[in-house]
Amino acid sequence: MTSATSRAYDHVKQAILDRAYPGGALLSEGEIATAVGVSRTPVREALLRLEAEGLVRLYPKRGALVLPVSPKEISDVLETRELVETFAAGKASLDPALITELTELLEAMREHAAAGNAQEFARADRCFHRAVVAAAGNEIIIQLYDALRDRQLRMARLTADDPDRTAAAIHEHGEILEAVRSGDRRRIRGAIHRHLQTAVTALRGHT
């Protein structure tokens, strides 16, 4: 059975990642305890874990402040992503299975955008990039990339409600897919670089 602390942790973390608890929100232990159906002690323990992950800052007797995504965090994460993704593009197995997976994920992005489902759009976006990384076959690099998962999803949600950025992102992912189809690794790296550079600019405009 899932522990009370884990339930509280999962609830708050998912709400932060989905921006149901946006940056700058002050969370009350009592309100969280009521929402999850647990006592305050496991909520406090969950918030301590989230503080260690850099998602909240605790203020005794006041609650927990959800830390906004900072410009530096955006730069650091996107810089790390470019290093990993462009390296992976040089080693990835550019086989029909990868092309099929990327095609399906791009179509999912289009469908979620049309439905206005920002949460699922952000997840499909992340899965698209992870597929390229996974195709390189380096398990340590995959683990490193997965360690960025929460930060990526949270950042993606900053612009997922912006129809202009969503349309641009779909176009840019289409360019990456076409580069993969071409088998030209230099072209793939270039498409990834351009996409991440425009993402940095867009994300900074929403912080």
Image: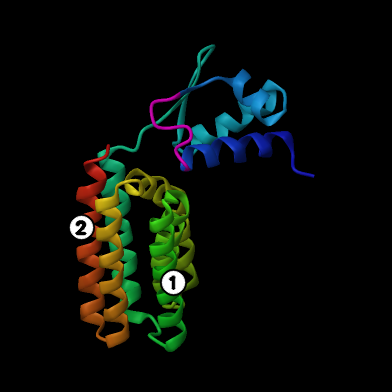
Residue identifier under label 1: 131
Question: Is 3 positioned to the left or the right of 134 in the image?
Answer: right
**Amino acid on which disc 1 is placed:** Ala
The amino acid type, in three-letter code, at marker 2 is Gln
Q: How many dots with numbers? A: 2
The residue positioned 29% from the left and 70% from the top of the image is: 86
- Our reading of the magenta stretch's main secondary structure is loop
Q: Quadrant of the C terminus?
A: top left
Mark 1 or mark 2: whose residue is earlier in sequence: 1
Q: Magenta segment: does it hold 63? A: no
Foreground pick, 59 / 180: 180
* CB within 8 Å, label 1 to label 2: no
Q: Which residues are magenta?
A: 18-25
Residue at 32 percent of width and 76 percent of height: 177
Asked if residue 101 lies left or right of residue 203, the reply is: right
- Placement of 173 over or under 103, stated as above or below: above
Marks 1 and 2 sit apart, C-alpha to C-alpha, by 20 Å
Up-down: is 102 above or below 152?
below
Q: Residue 25, image x and y in percent? A: 43, 25
Q: Residue lying farthest top? A: 61
* Residue assigned mark 2: 197
The picture quadrant where one finds residue 104 is bottom left
Please give the name of the residue rendered at 35% of the width and 74% of the height, measured from the top-left corner: 88
Q: 130 and 99: which one is in front? A: 99
